[in-house]
Image: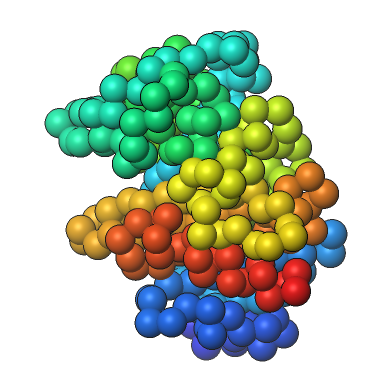
Amino acid sequence: MLTRRSVLGMLVGAALRAAPLERFFGAAHGTAVLLDLKTHKVLGVHQPELAARWLLPPGSTMKPFSVGALLDSGKLRPGEQIPCPIKLTLAGRSFTCSHPPTGVPMRADSAIAYSCNNFVAHFAKRFEAGELARALKFPATSGLFGDEVAGRVQPAGDIVERQLQAIGEADVLVTPAGLLAAYAALATRAGGLVLDGLEGSVEYGTSQLAAVPGVKVAGKTGTVVDRNGTHIVWFAGFAPSRSPEVAVVVTAQGRSGAIDAAPIAGRILAERFK
Ligand SMILES: [Zn+2]
């Protein structure tokens, strides 16, 4: 049986072998992990206990998986587009899009780049009950840390629940380490409009502050409210986007993923590729 001391020892051991990332954080409370995709070694980590044990909804970092599942199943055709009405309410909660009016209809790639809730919620109505949960294949744990809390994916029932799951607000909980593993897997297989969308997020969408000069970064932001009402921000991604060497996750208390998580990831990646 693992004692708390041995668990902490393993976590601290992982932290000591990897480079500390604290200097990229400023005052933000949170965690980050930088993973080498070829050796599957942790290159850098800040607050490994949080990375392994902070169980949260993924929020909009879920969208590339949801859009990818729709495209893979043929339920979303690559050319399909809808104008975004900006406002959105699901189950009595506001999920109004944070992007400005774009003037052109949203497609799969621009919807990921702009993190368009309306696009994803609209097409998520085409999922069967439980379909997205089956398609996700999120690893329960990353295997990177000694005592990880397992992520949870549950089948979504009614239409609204399927919409909420597709935007990462219901029936999925992940740790930062778990989401990193999911993005590491995504890095090896993402192509087409999903990869275009993840690149677009950094080029012209919500992840612009994760951009690194001379290196094309693919990634996605998210912003969620935890059960205590605290705003938690996400960035998950990989680089270089077309021949990935590293994946990174940042999770912190903050206002929005675009403002508070993406720039931390940008600084971590800039150091790696300088
Ligand atoms: Zn939108």
In this rendering, does residue 157 appear at all?
no
Q: Position of residue 89 (x, y in %)?
A: 21, 28
Q: Position of residue 239 (x, y in %)?
A: 72, 55
The residue at 56%/65% (across/down) is 265
In this rendering, does residue 31 appear at all?
yes
In the rendered view, does 124 fall on the left or right side of 267?
Answer: left
The residue at 18%/36% (across/down) is 93
Q: Tell me, what colour scheme is on the image?
A: rainbow
The residue at 66%/67% (across/down) is 269
Q: Is residue 231 above or below residue 186?
A: below
Q: Position of residue 268 (x, y in %)?
A: 62, 72
Front one among 108 and 17: 108
Q: Quadrant of the C terminus?
A: bottom right
Q: Position of residue 107 (x, y in %)?
A: 52, 22
Q: Is residue 59 above or below residue 197?
A: below
Residue furthest to the front = 103
Front one among 208 and 35: 208
In the rendered view, does 244 fall on the left or right side of 213?
Answer: right
Q: Quadrant of residue 273?
A: bottom right
Q: Quadrant of residue 92?
A: top left
Q: Is residue 245 above or below residue 113?
A: below
Front one among 75 and 151: 75
Q: Quadrant of the N terminus?
A: bottom right
Residue furthest to the left = 92
Q: Quadrant of residue 64?
A: top right
